[in-house]
Image (spheres, grey):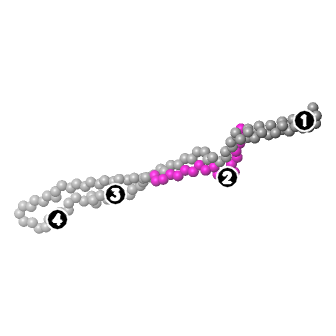
Amino acid sequence: MNDKTLKGAIAGAVAGLVGVSQVAAQEDIAAAGNGGTADASANGGAVATGDINSGGNVGTAIGVGDTYGSVAVDGGAIANATSLDVSVDGGTAIADASGGDYNIAFVS
């Protein structure tokens, strides 16, 4: 084997190895900062109500002045209904799982 043939064989082997390493490197994918898990909640919280005045706890007020003879006073029927609808809506929850800066990626 002469010197030119040996140099050609070595150059071909090196080119082949470089080609194989390039193909192998193209199959590997490294990802850094892909986020991960993001949790979000839009809990409503708590509601506190103060005193609720529903009619002032007063029925019918009747005043009878000076009378002569028989007197009949009828206050009628008293009914008072109070209805409350209290809601604590959560609103909108926004979660962000951005990767951020200074992440490290490994290729196995």
Q: Is residue 18 above or below residue 98?
A: above
Q: Is residue 32 left or right of residue 82?
A: right
Residue positioned 14% across, 65% down in the render? 64
Q: Check whether the beta carbons of the residues at disc 2 and disc 3 lie within 8 A of each other.
A: no
- Earlier sequence position, callout 2 versus callout 1: 1
Task: Check the picture and name the quadrant holding the N terminus.
Answer: top right
Task: Judge depth for marks 3 and 1 and give the one in front.
Answer: 1
- Earlier sequence position, callout 2 versus callout 3: 3
Please identify the residue farthest to the top as the structure is shown.
Answer: 1
Q: Let me know if residue 93 is in the magenta part.
A: yes
Three-letter residue code for mark 2: Asp
Q: Which residues are magenta?
A: 90-108
Q: Residues within 10 Å of mark 4 (few under 14, many from 20)?
A: few
- Is disc 2 placed on a helix, strand or loop? loop
User: Residue under circle 1?
Assistant: 5
Rendered image: mark on residue 20: none
CA gap between label 3 and label 1 equals 103 Å
Three-letter residue code for mark 1: Thr
Q: Main secondary structure of the magenta part?
A: loop
Rendered image: mark on residue 63: 4
Residue 45 is at least partly visible in this image = no
CA gap between label 1 and label 4 equals 131 Å
Three-letter residue code for mark 4: Gly
Residue 43 is at least partly visible in this image = yes
Q: Is residue 34 left or right of residue 47?
A: right
